[in-house]
C-alpha cells in the first residue's frame, strides 16, 4: 500500500523509525536501497540546529538516494523550532517531523521537550503552529500515547495537531513513563486514528512480518514504523512491505549477500563519520549483524578490541569466510 504525506507519495507504507545513534545517513541509505517507504533522521535538538553545530549539520544531511526523508526536530521554544525547521527547508529537507515522544530525562525533564510536551497541550500546540507556519514543506508529528497511564491524551493532541496543519501522525503505543517496558498498545493507537483524517502510523514492537499486519488490522492505521526490528536486519522493512503487499515472505539474504551488505555499510560509515566515530558505530552494528552466528561471541570480543578499521575488516573477513564455509558444509551433509 502506498502512502501520501500531503503531496508527497511514498512507495510503501513502511517507515524506518528515527533512532538516535542508529539511523544516520549510512544506515538510512542502506535501508532505503534495500527497500522502505520512507526514512527519518535522528532527533536533532532545535537549539543546536539553529547554531548549526557540526553534529547537527551532520545529522540533518540527507542524500538524494534516500529521499523522501524527514528531518526530526526536538525543542520547547516555538520560535527556535520554527527557525530550525526553516533552516532545514532551505537546506533541502522534504519533510519536518516534530518529536513529542522522546522519554529520556535530558530531553523530557531538563529541556521540557520530546514527550514532556504531551503534558502541556497548549504549549505543544504553540510549537506545532510555529513550526507549520515557518515552512512550506509538510510537517509531521511523532508521539507516544501520553505521559502516563492516567494521561493518555494522544487522541486529543492528534486532533489539535491536525487542526494546526500537521500532515501525518505517528504513535508509539507506550506512555512516556513506560519508557521501553511493557508492550506497545496497538489497540489504543486506533483511538488516535479515529480522531483524524491525516495518515496515522502505528509504531512499537514490530519484529515479524505478521506483527506489522496485526498492527495495521488492530489499529486500522495507514502504515507502520519499524525501529529496533531493523537492528542487524536492514532488509527487514523490505520483507515487511513485501509481505503486506503479497502475503508472501521474502527469504533473508544469503550469508555472502549479508557480508556484502555489511561491508558496504561499514565503508560508508567510515566515509561519513571518519575512522574514530565510524569505528564506534561499526562495532555497534557488527554486534547486531553477528548475533546468532556460530562462534560470534569470541568474534565480537576481538572486534570490540580492534582499534583500526583495517584490523576490523580483516576480522570480519575471516569470520564471514568461516560462516560461509560452515553453511556450505551443512549443505553437503544434508
Ligand atoms: C536507540 C533508540 C533511539 C531512538 N531515538 C529516537 C529519536 O531520535 N526520535 C524518535 O522519535 N524516537 C526515537 N526512538 C524511538 C523509536 O523511534 C521507536 O518509537 C521505538 O523504538 C518503538 O519502536 P520499535 O519497537 O519498532 O523500536 C529511539 C529508540 C531507540 C531504541
Image: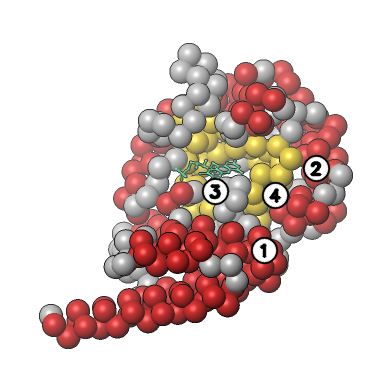
Specify whether tag 3 is near ligand 1 (CB below 8 Å): yes
| Residue to which mark 1 is pinned | 276
Residue projecting furthest to the top: 150
Distance of mark 1 from mark 2, alpha carbons? 22 Å
> Which mark is on residue 71?
4
Would you place residue 261 above or below residue 57 in this image? below
Would you place residue 155 above or below residue 320 in this image? above
Tell whether 180 sits left or right of 122: left
Residue drawn at x 57%, y 53% is: 22
| Residue to which mark 2 is pinned | 48
Whichever of callouts 3 and 2 sits on the residue coming sooner in the sequence is 3
Distance of mark 4 from mark 3, alpha carbons? 12 Å
Tell whether 42 sits left or right of 221: right
> Which mark is on residue 17?
3
Q: Residues within 10 Å of mark 2 (few under 14, many from 20)?
A: some
Q: Residues within 10 Å of mark 3 (few under 14, many from 20)?
A: many
Residue 212 seen by the camera: no
Tell me whether the residue at label 2 lies in contact with that at label 4, contact meaning CB atoms closer than 8 angstroms. Answer: no
Specify whether tag 1 is near ligand 1 (CB below 8 Å): no
Q: Nearer the viewer, residue 240 or 260?
A: 260
Residue projecting furthest to the bottom: 332
Whichever of callouts 2 and 4 sits on the residue coming sooner in the sequence is 2
Whichever of callouts 3 and 1 sits on the residue coming sooner in the sequence is 3
In this view, the mark in front (2 or 4): 2
Residue drawn at x 17%, y 85% is: 332
Asked where in the image residue 162 lies, by quadrant, the reply is top right
Residue 213 rendering spot, x and y as whole percentages: 35, 48
Q: For the C terminus, which image quadrant?
A: bottom left
Q: Nearer the viewer, residue 42 or 96?
A: 42
In this view, the mark in front (1 or 2): 1
Specify whether tag 2 is near ligand 1 (CB below 8 Å): no
Residue 133 rendering spot, x and y as whole percentages: 82, 36
Amino acid at each position: 500500500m502506498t502512502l501520501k504525506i500531503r503531496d508527497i507519495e511514498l512507495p510503501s507504507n513502511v517507515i524506518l523509525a528515527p533512532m538516535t545513534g542508529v539511523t544516520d545517513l549510512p544506515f538510512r541509505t542502506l535501508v532505503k536501497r534495500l527497500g522502505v517507504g520512507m526514512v527519518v533522521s535522528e532527533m536533532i535538538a532545535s537549539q543546536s540546529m539553529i547554531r548549526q553545530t557540526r553534529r547537527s549539520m551532520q545529522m540533518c544531511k540527507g542524500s538524494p538516494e534516500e529521499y523522501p526523508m524527514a528531518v526530526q526536530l526536538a525543542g520547547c521554544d516555538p520560535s527556535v523550532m520554527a527557525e530550525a525547521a526553516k533552516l532545514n527547508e532551505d537546506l533541502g529537507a522534504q519533510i519536518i517531523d516534530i518529536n513529542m515522544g522522546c522519554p529520556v530525562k535530558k530531553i523530557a525533564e531538563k529541556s521540557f521537550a520530546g514527550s514532556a510536551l504531551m503534558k502541556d497541550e497548549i504549549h505543544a500546540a504553540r510549537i506545532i503552529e510555529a513550526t507549520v507556519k515557518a515552512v512550506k514543506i509538510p510537517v509531521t508529528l511523532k508521539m507516544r500515547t501520553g505521559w502516563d497511564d492516567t494521561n493518555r491524551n494522544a487522541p486529543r493532541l492528534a486532533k489539535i495537531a491536525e487542526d494546526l496543519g500537521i500532515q501525518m501522525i505517528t504513535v508509539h503505543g507506550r506512555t512516556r513513563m513506560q519508557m521501553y517496558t511493557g508492550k506497545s498498545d496497538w489497540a489504543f493507537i486506533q483511538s488516535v486514528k479515529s480522531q483524524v483524517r491525516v495518515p496515522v502510523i502505528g509504531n512499537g514492537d514490530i519484529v515479524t512480518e505478521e506483527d506489522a499486519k496485526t498492527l495495521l488490522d488492530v489499529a486500522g492505521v495507514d502504515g507502520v514504523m519499524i525501529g529496533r526490528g531493523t537492528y542487524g536486519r536492514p532488509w527487514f522493512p523490505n520483507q515487511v512491505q513485501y509481505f503486506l503487499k503479497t502475503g508472501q515472505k521474502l527469504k533473508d539474504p544469503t550469508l555472502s549477500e549479508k557480508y556484502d551488505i555489511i561491508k558496504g555499510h561499514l565503508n560508508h560509515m567510515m566515509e561519513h563519520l571518519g575512522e574514530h566515530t565510524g569505528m564506534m558505530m561499526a562495532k555497534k552494528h557488527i554486534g547486531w549483524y553477528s548475533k546468532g552466528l556460530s562462534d560470534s561471541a569470541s568474534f565480537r570480543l576481538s572486534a570490540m578490541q580492534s582499534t583500526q578499521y583495517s584490523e576490523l575488516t580483516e576480522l570480519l573477513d575471516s569470520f564471514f569466510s568461516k560462516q560461509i564455509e560452515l553453511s556450505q558444509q551443512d549443505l553437503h551433509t544434508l
